[in-house]
Every structure is written in structure tokens, then in C-alpha cells.
Image (cartoon, grey):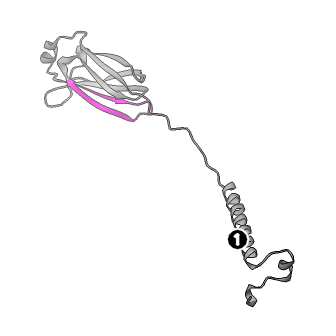
């Protein structure tokens, strides 16, 4: 055997040769690598959170108006009001949106409102989108997901400009 392949005297005494020593070093290295990997993984943590909740289901509000207590389309024509106009506000005061409907409909459904307490202002407009009435302030109303709330209002004759 060449010198570099000879086993050390203590290896020969234990019945181990150079190839067995190399195999043992390989096993020891693998064991050290396994312990190091396990130690590294033990320091890692994973956080599992529940899936996010779906957004709340939207509700609807029916704006239901009258002119001086009636639902007579002739009142729209007689007063020069062609369009119902409403702006809604959320509980934080943010504008939820503005909607318009033909005056003679006397009702319009607003879909897609998220659960909240809303307020608003409504008026009637002429064909040029100029106000025909002073603004009516809507009392606070609650929208609940999956339901429809009716919001009644009246434009008394003294509200016309």
C-alpha cells in the first residue's frame, strides 16, 4: 500500500482501514448535517391564520318620495321637476354616491350599499339639472346586508324654489 492509503495504527488495531474510515467520516458528516438542518428548522416558525372573512354582503335602500304628499306624475310636470336627485353619506361622513331617477317614478332602488348607517340629501331638479326644491335631509337609516330598507321623504309645496 502506498503511504497515504495506510491506516493509522489505532485504526488497524480497531480493524478499520482507510476506506472504512472514509465511510465513517461520511456517516458522521451526514449526521452532523442532519442535526444542523434540524436545528435550523427548529428556529423557524410558521404562522397559520384563518382565511380572511368575506366582505359583508351589500344591502339596498329604496328612496320613496312624494310631492306634497302625493305620487301624481302631473305634480312633477306642474312644478317643473323632471329628476329626483339624492346623495348618500356613510356614518363617517364620506360620500357613498349620488343617484338620479325620473321624477315620475316616485321611487328608486339603490343597490350595493354596505352595512352602515347612512344619511343623505335629496332634491328635485329641472330638465337643466338645476334645483327645483330645497334639499330634504334624510334621517339616519341603517342598511343591513342582504336586506332592503325603504326611506320615505316628501317634497312639500313650500320646498319648491
Q: Is residue 41 above or below residue 27?
A: above
> What is the quadrant of the C terminus in the image?
top left
Give the left or right position of residue 139, taking residue 78 as reference. right
Q: Quick one: SS at disc 1?
A: helix
Q: Position of residue 47 (x, y in %)?
A: 60, 46
Residue 77 placement: quadrant: top left
Tell me if residue 52 is in the magenta stretch: no
Tell me if residue 96 is in the magenta stretch: yes
- Which residues lie in the magenta part? 84-101
Which residue bears the numbered disc 1?
26
What residue is drawn where x is 67% and y is 61%? 37
Q: Position of residue 86 (x, y in %)?
A: 28, 27
Evaluate whether residue 135 shows in this view.
no
Q: Is residue 108 above or below residue 99?
A: above
What residue is drawn where x is 66% and y is 56%? 41
Q: Position of residue 57 (x, y in %)?
A: 41, 28
Q: Is residue 10 above or below residue 138?
A: below
> What is the quadrant of the N terminus in the image?
bottom right
Give the left or right position of residue 60, taking residue 158 as reference. right
Amino acid at each position: 500500500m502506498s503511504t497515504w492509503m495506510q491506516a493509522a495504527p489505532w485504526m488497524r488495531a480497531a480493524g478499520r482501514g482507510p476506506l472504512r474510515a472514509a465511510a465513517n467520516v461520511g456517516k458522521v458528516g451526514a449526521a452532523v448535517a442532519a442535526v444542523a438542518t434540524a436545528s435550523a428548522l427548529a428556529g423557524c416558525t410558521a404562522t397559520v391564520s384563518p382565511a380572511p372573512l368575506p366582505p359583508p354582503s351589500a344591502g339596498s335602500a329604496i328612496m320613496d318620495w312624494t310631492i306634497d304628499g302625493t305620487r301624481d306624475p302631473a305634480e312633477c310636470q306642474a312644478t317643473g321637476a323632471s329628476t329626483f336627485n339624492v346623495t348618500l353619506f356613510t356614518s363617517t361622513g364620506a360620500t357613498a354616491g349620488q343617484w338620479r331617477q325620473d321624477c315620475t317614478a316616485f321611487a328608486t332602488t339603490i343597490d350595493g350599499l354596505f352595512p352602515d348607517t347612512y344619511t343623505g340629501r335629496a332634491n328635485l331638479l329641472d330638465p337643466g339639472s338645476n334645483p327645483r326644491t330645497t334639499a330634504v335631509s334624510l334621517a339616519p337609516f341603517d342598511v343591513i346586508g342582504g336586506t332592503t330598507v325603504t326611506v320615505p321623504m316628501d317634497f312639500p309645496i313650500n320646498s319648491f324654489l
